[in-house]
Image (spheres, helix red, strand yellow):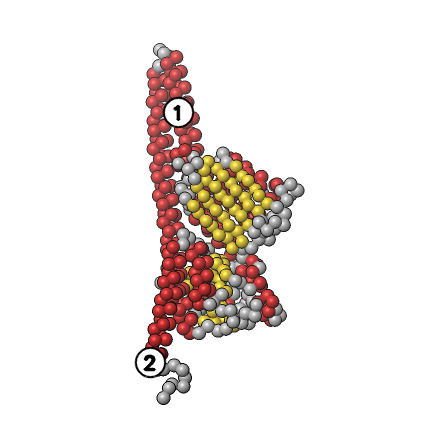
Amino acid sequence: MDDQRGISPADSPARAEDAHVRELRILNAIAEALNSSPDVQRALERTLGLVADLLGLRTGWIWLMDAETGQFYNAAARNLPPYLQKPVRMTGRPCMCIDEFNDGALTPKNIDMIQCTRLQPAVMRQATDLTHGLAYHASIPLYFQDKPLGILNVTGPSWRRLTDEELNLLSTIAYQVGIAIDRARLADESAHLARAEERTRLAREIHDTLAQGLTAIALHLEGALNNLSAKPERAKQRLERALETARESLEEARRSVLDLREAPLAGKPLATAIRSSSRAFTSETGIRVRVRVDGVRALPLRVEAELFRIAQEALANIRRHAEATEVEITLQSTAKDVRLSVRDNGHGFDLGTVAADRQGIVGMRERARLLGGTLRVTSRRRSPSGTTVVAAVPVPEGTR
């Protein structure tokens, strides 16, 4: 007799095998995305895209915890409902998931939207146009070994509860994500250690340079004293050489001290410092910042410090004036110069009618000029392209 269910018992193992193969394909695709992306932020965005395409979970967002400050920031998002698209809703302030994560109590599970403190106000008002009818989201903690990293939140198009099988698969994906995040942080730590070694080298060079300079000055002065009475002209020449050597040594010492100055980079390479500042900015404002780095080499600290200050001022202007939702910072180096670009998607402004000093442009332009470079600002009021600030400074001869 034919099986009335339409599926023979022999088909069940085949179905299970097909599901297992599909899971392996999904995990392999996500592993490739995490390994091939040049930075962790882009890797997270690609991972959310793959989760959406392969698992049918169209909406997602990822919280990461800044290892330096302990602040949470929205590292990646996809297809957020309108209510969560407002940056103010996605700051790093505590919520139910973050509180449970901090207490070590968050496990992979479905969260009812009435429990979600971020969406609860809109859910209580039954503002389905703002929530898209979202009923549940799944929260999966991100760890590497015992190190807490963040939270992966996803939800399906029908706003249903995720099954145990889906939660288990997402837990495996979260493990892969945790490995990628930790790997990126180890790379930042290595760059930090390299900078510390460079500072030690510079300190040693200062000591050696000053020692040589002082020795030369002492020899010139000694020769001048020996010739002061019998050969005054000769003594004058030795004194002039001593003075010249003293001036050269003083200038070299000043340059070296400027290069050793930690603030505002706190001993970090420029790209690392910008990423750290961007994470804090996202945590405080909810505005996501994408940082792209292309071929940037080690630069004198005075150059990196001024470029960092320009980036900080540009972010401060965006916070105060732009009403943006996204920012892109690009750091790019060529054979002759290094370029820092900060672009937002805010409403822009009219360069001809807004006082430059109110936008912080004067300060940024002065910092670029001190480095022998230029600063260019492109903006148009109510333009969808927002505002772009580009600082271009020459690379010093010794670092080319």
Residue 285 lies left or right of residue 12; in this view the side is: right
Q: In the displayed structure, would residue 302 be above or below residue 248?
A: below
As drawn, 312 above or below 82: above
Judging depth in this view, the residue of 175 and 218 nearest the camera is: 175
**Residue at x 39%, y 61% (from the top left corner):** 30
User: Disc 2 marks which residue?
Assistant: 10
Mark pair 2, 1: CA separation: 92 Å
Q: In this view, does 297 lie to the left or right of 281?
A: left
Residue 245 badge? 1
| Nearer to me, 15 or 46 | 15
Residue at the image point whose x is 53% and y is 63% from the top: 80
Determine which quarter of the picture holds residue 249: top left
Residue 184 percent location from the top left of the image: 39, 54
Q: Which amino acid does label 1 sit on?
A: Thr
**Label 2 packing within 10 angstroms: few (<14), some (14-19), many (20+):** few
Quarter of the rendering containing residue 142: bottom left
